[in-house]
Image (spheres, rainbow, N blue to C red):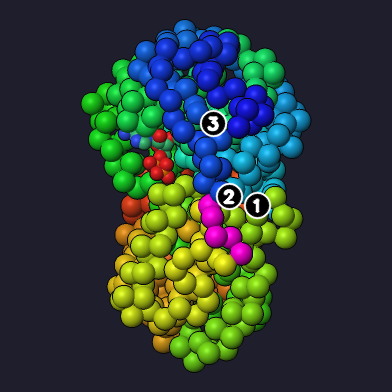
Amino acid sequence: MKTVMQSYPVNQVYIGGNFVTPHGSELFDLFNPVNGKLIGQVQLADEVDAEMAIAAAKSALPRWSATSKEVRIEALRRLQVSVAASKVDLLEAVTTEYGAPQRNSYMVDSTVTAFSNMIKTLEEFDFTRKIGRARVELAPVGVAGLITPWNSDAFFIADKLATALAAGCTVVIKPSEMSAMQTHVITKALHEAGLPKGVLNIVTGRGDVVGSAITRHPDVSKISFTGSTETGKIILSQAVETMKRVTLELGGKSPSIILDDADLEEAASGALMAGFANSGQACVAGTRILVPEKRLAEFLAIATEKMADFPVGDPRDPATAIGPMVSERQWNRVQRYIHRGVADGARIVVGGPGRPTEFPEGYFVRPTLFADVTNDMLIAREEIFGPVLSVITYRDENHAVEIANDSTYGLHAYVFSSDSERAGRIASRLEVGRVSINGAYEPLSPFGGFKQSGIGREYGAFGLEGFLEPRSIMA
Ligand code: ADP
């Protein structure tokens, strides 16, 4: 315990360019998800710390908001170089803290590319536009409050920070209280990049204390939040009094639609990969696999075999694809859903309740594939946030689209087909913010949800506009 704590002094917050001991004194336990043992305690910030961080961001705003595009690009470059230099430490922290398999180093790579992607966006972005007789200026919205979840805390810090700085905003970041180690690593890297004091402030505390103080504060103009739909609704209601601009990236129950012309080997691999990303603890996880009725038996046989490509295990083992769940609470939640699936009549094809026999302690679950799932079952409607996938059959294309859209969520979808034009036509009918056809990915395209998956968009130019206010000047 001592060595872990020595490498991560999680008793500091970052305000006005300095690491300081928080005013808050509450301690929050951190557990090793591999064995459930206590590994450290975070000293949490409180409302006083939040106030100080907001004041620092406010006082740095006039100068930062007046900087040129070149100055912001230069700052983003320094941040990128500094974060890139901490990749090894960051990977170690995410593994220790929430059991992220080291094989998935994309978690860390994307934290670095968040900066290069925003540099690219900024280079091509026009802050002044002409509309008839008006000159439209896109002005920074003000102090931004950035609230991140534990499942990819460092990436979300990097992405939201890069976007806010590119827009000319100063920020107060409220990372997840469960991510103090990765927050420490990235804060140190960001500090070393030497931004002007007060532009960046980071206060780790409880959501209902520090998060709430930020979302209610009159000096904060914008909230960018990633997390659960439940918390997103609370944040939206807290932000209304001061009429904050709010971007919410929330939960999902994303469909993976396998068309009848798909190569099932490739589609099964792709669908499992989409479902098991980040050990299933991802908002974009493709958790409803829609398979044509007539190819069900064939799909299940192939998918069962392919499950072996996603071994559960120690996150430090390079073979491991699925690590433990982040917490005991999350382990229990996954178990409840597996039991509920069985009770509702779904059939376990692979996996099931309990721990894998090789991992009798910690928060390991058995990656589970359910068949005979109907879209009205709870396991097809609610976000489980674990490696539990539901196979649902459909009759024809229209039926597939109907099932895919029959959800309160609308974050992401995946389509697998050997005919990309046909897949594209299906994609255009889906009520979701992003569709990936045969695994394609574009980081600069807007990311966010329809329906209860969120409000607004992140990444690229759409993300940048979320931190800007248009001002029309007519002459
Ligand atoms: P999870 O349960 O997966 O941690 P949450 O949506 O609860 O997901 O948390 C995401 C982030 O929102 C965390 O940083 C958390 O501390 C924060 N949070 C939780 N409650 C609130 C709140 N009332 N106001 C602001 N932030 C909150």
Give me the residue at 37% from left, 32% from top. 207
Mark 3 lies on residue: 40
Task: Relative to 380, say whether 100 is above or below.
Answer: above
Helix, strand or loop at mark 1: loop
Helix, strand or loop at mark 3: strand
Mark 2 lies on residue: 34
* Residues tagged 2 and 1 counted as in contact (Cβ below 8 A): yes
Q: Position of residue 110 (x, y in %)?
A: 65, 43
Residue nearest the observer in this picture, 153 or 411: 153
Identity, as a three-letter code, of the amino acid under mark 1: Pro
Mark 1 lies on residue: 315
State which region is magenta: 358-362
Residue nearest the observer in this picture, 225 or 228: 228
Residue nearest the observer in this picture, 33 or 56: 33
Q: How many marks?
A: 3
Chain-order first, disc 2 or disc 1: 2
Q: Is residue 357 left or right of residue 234?
A: right
Cα gap from disc 2 to disc 1, whole angstroms: 8 Å
Cα gap from disc 3 to disc 1, whole angstroms: 19 Å
Identity, as a three-letter code, of the amino acid under mark 2: Val
Q: Position of residue 195 (x, y in %)?
A: 63, 15
Is ligand 1 less than 8 Å from the beta carbon at label 2? Answer: no
Identity, as a three-letter code, of the amino acid under mark 3: Gly
Q: Ligand 1 sits in which quadrant?
A: top left
Q: Looking at the rendering, which quadrant does residue 438 occupy?
A: bottom right
Q: Position of residue 330 (x, y in %)?
A: 43, 52
Give me the residue at 36% from left, 76% from top. 342
Give me the residue at 48% from left, 85% from top. 292
Cα gap from disc 2 to disc 3, whole angstroms: 14 Å
On-image quarter of the C terminus: top left
